[in-house]
């Protein structure tokens, strides 16, 4: 979950089409017994940020055997996604665009108007993260992580990544409809009626909900291909690394 809009990601999708080789086999570092490491922790093969700015705390390597996470870890993921530094900068950037477009005109202009837009964006981000990554996954016993496919044709991997907003894993490792994603973002849209005075109609709520779902879908695509792009960049700039 995040405040990024789909249009902001569009320009980043093109490099994914250039990939021609499957990723190298992951190096699995040791982790404490009985503990499933999250991105950024010892034992994880996943970066905590994709492209250096996109929070990546709920991404897992799908090529590894499934290992469930605890309720505490679900809330840890939501917390890390919420307080991640770059996410505040991203919110500030898009709040500026919203100000230029005069979205939600009741907010006004000037510093007061910008502050209201920024506050709304941060609230959407925080509520969305906890609803889709912690609260609903706990209630429905779903795993909020995105499990990278890691191998296969690019188109199939992209379709797989996009579809994970509709399909998720349970705590038992089975696949089923992603209730947390749909209900979580629906809840965020409904709560938004409290601070979006210009967007309280049914259509406005649906637009906010599907905008967030679409954003999460494209985020999954970026997370799917980020390790491939990172590896290719490293190979290109370091002749000591063999293909």
Image: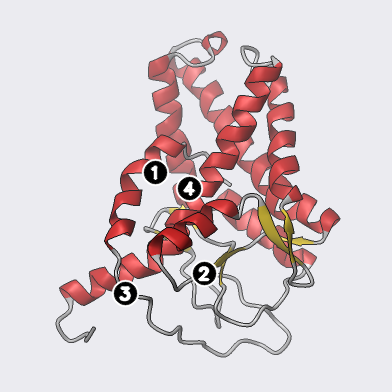
Q: Name the residue under label 2.
A: 149
3D distance between C-alphas at marks 2 and 1: 20 Å
Do residues under tags 3 and 1 come within 8 Å of each other at their CB atoms?
A: no
Residue 2 in the image: x percent, y percent?
54, 44
Q: Name the residue under label 3.
A: 21
3D distance between C-alphas at marks 2 and 4: 15 Å
Going 53% across and 48% down the picture, which residue do you hit? 217
Q: Mark 4 points at which residue?
A: 218
Do residues under tags 1 and 4 come within 8 Å of each other at their CB atoms?
A: yes
**Direction from residue 113 to residue 129 in the image, left or right:** right
* Residue 7, placed above or below residue 53: above
**Direction from residue 101 to residue 172 in the image, left or right:** right
- Label 2 neighbourhood size at 10 Å, few (<14), some (14-19), many (20+)? some
- Label 1 neighbourhood size at 10 Å, few (<14), some (14-19), many (20+)? some
Q: Return the disc, 1 or 4, that comes first in the chain's sequence.
A: 1
Do residues under tags 2 and 4 come within 8 Å of each other at their CB atoms?
A: no
* Residue 101, placed above or below residue 47: above
Going 76% across and 60% down the picture, which residue do you hit? 142
Q: Nearer the viewer, residue 131 or 195?
A: 131
Q: Nearer the viewer, residue 14 or 230?
A: 14
* Residue 3, placed above or below residue 145: above
Q: Considering the numbered disc 4 on the image, is that residue within a helix, a strand or a loop?
A: helix
- Label 3 neighbourhood size at 10 Å, few (<14), some (14-19), many (20+)? few
Residue 124 in the image: x percent, y percent?
62, 35
- Label 4 neighbourhood size at 10 Å, few (<14), some (14-19), many (20+)? many
The answer to whether one can see residue 66 in this image is: yes
Q: Considering the numbered disc 2 on the image, is that residue within a helix, a strand or a loop?
A: loop
3D distance between C-alphas at marks 3 and 1: 23 Å
């Amino acid at each position: 979950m995040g405040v990024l809009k789909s249009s902001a990601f569009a320009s980043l999708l093109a490099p994914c089409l250039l990939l021609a080789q499957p990723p190298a086999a992951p190096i699995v570092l040791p982790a404490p017994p009985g503990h499933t490491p999250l991105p950024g922790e010892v034992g994880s093969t996943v970066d905590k940020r994709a492209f250096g700015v996109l929070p990546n705390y709920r991404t897992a390597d799908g090529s590894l055997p499934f290992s469930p996470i605890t309720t505490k870890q679900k809330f840890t993921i939501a917390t890390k996604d919420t307080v991640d530094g770059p996410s505040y900068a991203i919110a500030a950037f898009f709040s500026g665009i919203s100000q230029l477009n005069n979205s939600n005109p009741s907010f006004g202009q000037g510093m007061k108007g910008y502050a209201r837009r920024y506050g709304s964006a941060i609230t959407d981000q925080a509520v969305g993260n906890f609803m889709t990554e912690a609260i609903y996954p706990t209630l429905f016993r779903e795993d909020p992580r995105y499990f990278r496919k890691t191998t296969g044709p690019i188109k199939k991997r992209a379709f797989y990544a996009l579809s994970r907003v509709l399909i998720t894993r349970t705590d038992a490792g089975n696949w089923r409809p992603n209730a947390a994603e749909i209900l979580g973002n629906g809840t965020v849209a409904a709560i938004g009626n409290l601070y979006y005075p210009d967007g309280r109609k049914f259509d406005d709520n649906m637009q906010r909900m599907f905008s967030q779902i679409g954003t999460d879908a494209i985020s999954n695509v970026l997370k799917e291909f980020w390790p491939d792009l990172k590896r290719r960049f490293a190979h290109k700039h370091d002749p000591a690394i063999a293909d």
